[in-house]
Image (cartoon, rainbow, N blue to C red):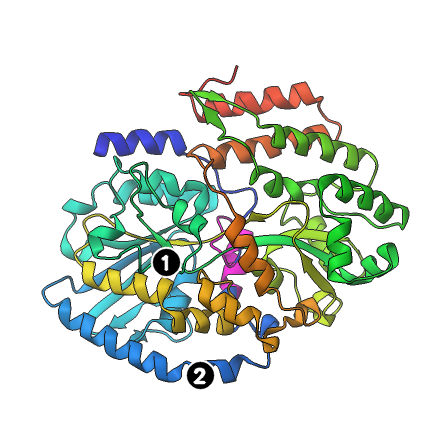
Amino acid sequence: MKKRMKTLLSLAMAAALVVPMAACGSGTTASSKSASASGSSASSASTSASSSATEETTAASSSSATEAASSAEDASGEGTVLNIQCWNDEFANRLAAHYPGFEAADPKDATKGGKIGDVTVKFTVTPSDDNAYQNNLDTVLPENADASADKKVDIFLVEADYALKYIDADANVAMKLSDLGITDDDLSKQYQYTKDVVTDANGDIRGSSWQACSAGLIFNRDIAKKVLGTDDLDAVQDAVSSWDKFNETAKKVKDASYQMCSAMDTYRVYSNNVSGPWVQDGKVVVDDNIKAWAEDSKALVDAGEENSYELWSDDWSKGFFKDTPVFCYFGPAWLINFSMHSDEDGSVGKDGGWGFVTGPQGFYWGGTWICAANGTDNPTLVKDIILNMTTNDDVMKEIAVDDSDCVNNKTVLDALASDEKFGNPILGGQNPYAMLSAGAEKVDMSNISIYDQGCNEEFQTAMKNYFDGNASYDDALAQFKSAIQEKYPDVSVD
């Protein structure tokens, strides 16, 4: 098993994500900041319904606390320390705020851990910068079964871009949820793609997420009125409903002296809709949809209709403010709620100036999955945490209302979508839950592979040189292939 794990880790080793995730489990410094915001009061996205909705779930939470106490009794004889590996404070904040019976050691810093009954909860936070978090997992997980009781990892968190490395059946570092006693029925309200991300080649699910990070096109309402004559959601969606229409609208936006977006902003939309995985029969294959991104983006950048700013750069972020207007961004709920500076004067979001539509193609961005570490000596408590934090309707609603997460629960999202109280002030009162729920149903993860993180990063890096006029397409493609050959020496790039 250890030999197999080392092989997988070697194959999947990559640098931190170019396009990080904020509230959904970022892999970079920028996203760590956003994730910290998501663990706070989330005041920028709060609604007038928050307190009343929280009151509605108080009784149910008390019931959950009773159930958790019962689970604690069942866990007698298990470990006295629950060790959790993570890369930021996001999950710590969720656990401290929503898991029944959790007593925080420091109310101001959830990563300081606390107590669940007689069990001490310890978080080990290793930032994702320079791949440090994965390097840490690669060190501790293969040896976990032989670790001393108080040092055993019980829970570790993963992101979609590298999840397959850790849920591989041969690697055997993440437990099958079925071995914990978690059933398909327990997970029945979750969106299928969130289960596919952590399903191994044998069909066994080895993780669970509280988030459904389907995404869409976030547009500036004022620019839409000036360019399209309206900010009506249906009309705007019609103007960007395909890439051809998106490109036509980009010309209109440029003619009105604005810019559409960054070329790097659209990459994840294209890459989420490929026809096959990056590596097929041992060879790197650049999908037609990835090629279309490069071709479309180059034309738009050359025409001055798009820029090529890197995501999370200062230039890219300027479009969040009224004095540097950009027509649109692409992202999920967490980008809107935690990353668009909506609590700052002068921002578009401060005055409810954004709208949210599906865009040319559905996609997702982000998510954090909870995995039970093979070798845990707290299986009963780990099971209860996964069930409460990712399948409990009442906890899911609390997280949606209190933290503005788009939760991985169809029943809860459908209820929120039909409740007019849950309009988002950043979106001018628009309720995005129906769109997000429909989007999550359409996400297809069948082409995910352990090579995704490195291939996606290196292709964007190479093509930015092409967009900026520093390389031809063939030269940029050669740069990409060279980087991939170095990163993944086991694959062919010819």
Drawn side of residue 250 relative to residue 45, left or right:
right
Instruction: Kindly identify which residue carries mark 2.
Output: 56
Instruction: Kindly identify which residue carries mark 1.
Output: 188
Please identify the quarter of the rendering in which residue 111 is found.
bottom left
Q: Is residue 80 above or below residue 475?
A: below
Drawn side of residue 450 relative to residue 69, left or right:
right
Q: Is residue 32 above or below residue 447?
A: below
Magenta-span inclusion, residue 27: yes
Say which of 105 and 373 sits in front.
373
Please identify the quarter of the rendering in which residue 154 is found.
bottom left
**Which region of the structure is painted magenta?**
23-37
| Neighbours of disc 2 within 10 Å: few (<14), some (14-19), many (20+) | some
Drawn side of residue 172 relative to residue 214, left or right:
left
Q: Position of residue 157 (x, y in %)?
A: 36, 52
Q: Position of residue 392 (x, y in %)?
A: 36, 68
Number of numbered tags placed on the structure image: 2
Q: Marks 2 and 1, how far apart in space?
A: 24 Å
Q: Secondary structure at mark 1?
A: loop
